[in-house]
Image (spheres, rainbow, N blue to C red):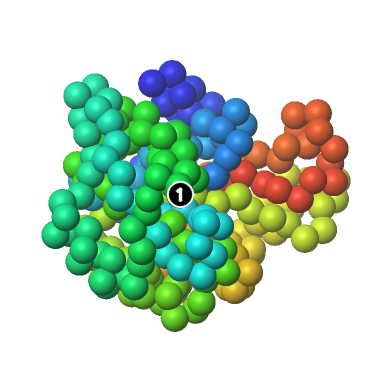
Amino acid sequence: MGYVVWASELIPTLKPSPDKPFSLAILPQGPHFYTWLLQAAGYLLLDNQKKKLVIISQQSHVPKDILLDNTNYGPIFGKTWGNTITKTKTLVSQLGAKLSTEKHTSLSEQMQFQLPFLRTITESDEIIHISIGDKIETTKINKVTQRINKNFNECNIVILTNIEISTPAKSKKSDEQTQLAKIIQKASLSTPLLTIFQKILISQKKKPEIVAYVNPGDFGKTWSLTTRYICAVW
C-alpha cells in the first residue's frame, strides 16, 4: 500500500480522467527494486470500473509458443484468483496456447510481484495471464491481439516489458522520453510484447502517454546501459 501512496505523491498528475480512464498500460518487468513506483502508477491509472484484467508477459521456456498461466494465486486478504477448467480450455483453443506447468517458473514469479497491486489497487475479479515466447511467430501474435481487441471494452490490459534503446547517450530527459515514445509506437518482430501493444493502439487509433520512466544510470550505474523502465498508458 505504501507504494500506492508514494506513486500519487511523486507523480502529482497521477489522476485518471473521469471521462476517459485508461485501459492499457506498459509496465516494467523488473527489477522490482527500481520499478515498484512505476507499476503502482500504472495500476492506479487503469479503469477501476473494469473487473477483468489481462496481464501479458514474456517467457523463454517455449520460445515459439504462448503459455496460459494455469496457477491459482492467493489468498491475499482473503481473495484468490484462478480460472475455471472450461474457461481455461476455451482460451487455450482460441489462442493456440499451451497450459503452464510448475516448470514454467517465470510465469508464477511475475504474477507474485503483481499480486499486491491487484488486490490493493485494481481489485480485479478475473485475471488472465498470458506469456508470449520471445521468438513467437506473427500469426500467434495476431491471435492474441485479435482477442484483446474484440474484448477491449470489457477489460484492462497490462503488458510487462522493459524497453531497450539502441544508442544510449547523455541527453536531456525530455529528449530521451521522445525517443522512448517512438520505440513503443514502432512495430518490430524482435519485440513481441511491444508489437502487441502497437497493434492494439493501431486498432484504437490512439497514441500512448508516457507517465514516467527510470534510467538505471540515475542510480549510480554507468550511463551506457540501454535498458529503460517505463510506465506508459492509453
Q: Which residue lies furthest to the top in this view?
A: 2
> Going 76% across and 33% down the picture, which residue do you hit?
218
Viewer-closest of 39 and 85: 85
Measured as percent of width and height from the top left, residue 68 is found at 35, 57
Q: Is residue 14 visible?
A: no
Name the image quarter holding residue 99. Answer: bottom left
Q: How many marks?
A: 1
Measured as percent of width and height from the top left, residue 207 is found at 49, 64
Measured as percent of width and height from the top left, residue 135 is found at 57, 69
Viewer-closest of 172 and 103: 103
Does residue 18 appear left or right of residue 173 in this picture? left
Amino acid type at mark 1:
His
Q: Can residue 97 be seen in this view?
A: yes
> Going 22% across and 34% down the picture, which residue do you hit?
80
> Pointer 1: what residue?
104
Viewer-closest of 119 and 173: 119
> Going 64% across and 53% down the picture, which residue do you hit?
163
> In the rendered image of this protein, does residue 109 appear above or below residue 186?
above
Q: Residue furthest bottom?
A: 139
Label 1 SS: loop
Point out the image quarter for the N terminus. Answer: top left
The residue carrying pointer 1 sits among few (fewer than 14), some (14 to 19) or many (20 or more) residues within 10 Å by Cα, namely some
Measured as percent of width and height from the top left, residue 101 is found at 38, 50
> Going 26% across and 55% down the picture, which residue do you hit?
155
